[in-house]
Image (spheres, grey):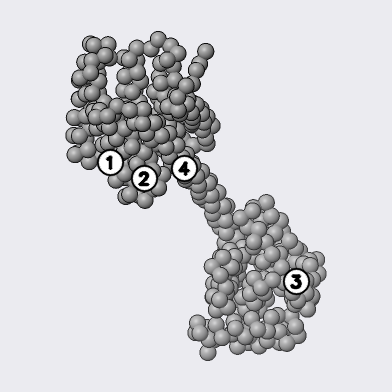
Amino acid sequence: MLVISTAYEFLSLITFTLGLCIATLAAFKSFTRISPLSNRVEPIYIAILALTVSLWSFMPIFRNNMALSSLWQWISLLVLVISISWYTIFVCNRIMPLESKYRRILWVAVILLVIAYGGLLITSGDNLFWNLSALLAAGLILAVDAALLLITAYRIKNTLYKLAAFSLAALAVSYTGGLWQPSTYWHIISLAGLIIYVIMMSLAALNNSYMRSMEYMNQKVEEVRQELAAQNENIEDVVITLARTIDAKDKYTEGHIERVSQYAVFLGERLGLSDRSLETLRIGALIHDLGKVGIDLNILNKPGELTAEEFEQIRLHPILGQQICSPLKSLQEVSDIIRYHHEKLDGSGYPDGLKGDQISLHVRIVAIADIFDALTTERAYRRALTVEEALNIMKAEAAQGKLDSYLLTEFEALLYDLGVAS
């Protein structure tokens, strides 16, 4: 039956239980976290460290309840010191390269520890000289670990690592202090230091693992975003190429969509629109006549006046264009431009007869650019109008409430700034 008779044994039991709990949680985290295997190393190290802490604190609890030799107690201390040093060096070396002077001190301490434990093995752990040598070596190693961790903590300004370093220092002092004045007091200090060290390093590891997992997830999200953006860009390129191909088939409208796009973007810049709005204008203007792919070329290129049936076919191209783009999410923002660029503010346009505020700013801008370029370029049924003639016609439509008079005024000023009008 397990009997707890002293405060030291009670604290050892708490340390033993805490170590098992932390080891279990760390192992669970390492195998359930969504991250690459490299990000799971630290939780695994924490699990190993916590298990060695439990092993070491196990000895004081059961030494009065079980026949455990002093050699086994020394072995548990050796495993504990190696585990602490291994993990501390892993953490520090990941943040900054381990300096050569610390390496030399650690090697001296390790050699001393190996020699001391060799003597303990020979004497079955009962020789005073080798006991003192082992305690001195363990204390020296822990002191170097504490110094290394403290320097690292101050460089990166990490409070958890600072507290862990101070707890390691307390642990080192407890072993060296026990050399001069053996007392249960030093054992309690060592347990307290060990508890604080394990808790602080576990919290730091949890935080580090979380941050790296977030970075990993953000990286994956960014990769997916870039992949989708590339796919959308490819889709846009195909659609724009198709629109340009349609534009090029008609010698009278060749270059029309490019000019409309330029006029629309220039006017948008003059109005102080955002980069996103300017991009919407650019893409929307380039594909605003995409629906003409479904219109008979004989109708599009007819030199004379269109019949009523032929004009009805022409009036379908905004609807056809929107239908072509509707499955493409990347082109949803420009779908209104495609469908409504022939609408008028007074409701006399097509295909839906929208009025006033039902027509967005983007659509109004592209409509003005589209009408101006159509009037100033040669068509099969008429000559190209001069800039002044085209503006006069557009001003008349604005006076009738068909076009946005403010946008037309800004557009006229833009033409003068560009040197198109004089």
x, y percent for residue 335: 67, 61
Side of 96 where 50 appears, left or right = right
Residue drawn at x 20%, y 25% is: 112
**Helix, strand or loop at disc 1?**
helix
Q: State the mark number for residue 147.
A: 1
Residue type marked 2: Lys
Contact between marks 2 and 1 (CB within 8 A): the answer is no
For marks 4 and 3 on the same chain, the one whose residue lies earlier in the sequence: 4
Q: State the mark number for residue 358.
A: 3
Which one is closest to the eye, mark 4 or mark 3?
A: 4
Mark 2–mark 1 Cα distance, whole angstroms, equals: 10 Å
Badge 3 local density, few (<14 within 10 Å), some, or many (20+)? few
Q: State the mark number for residue 207.
A: 4
Asked whether 418 or 331 is in front, the reply is 331
For marks 2 and 3 on the same chain, the one whose residue lies earlier in the sequence: 2
Image quadrant assignment for residue 61: top left
Name of the residue lying farthest toward the bottom = 422
Q: State the mark number for residue 162.
A: 2
Q: State the mark number for residue 244.
A: none
Residue type marked 1: Ala
**Helix, strand or loop at disc 2?**
helix
Residue drawn at x 52%, y 35% is: 33
For marks 2 and 1 on the same chain, the one whose residue lies earlier in the sequence: 1
**Helix, strand or loop at disc 4?**
helix
Contact between marks 2 and 3 (CB within 8 A): the answer is no
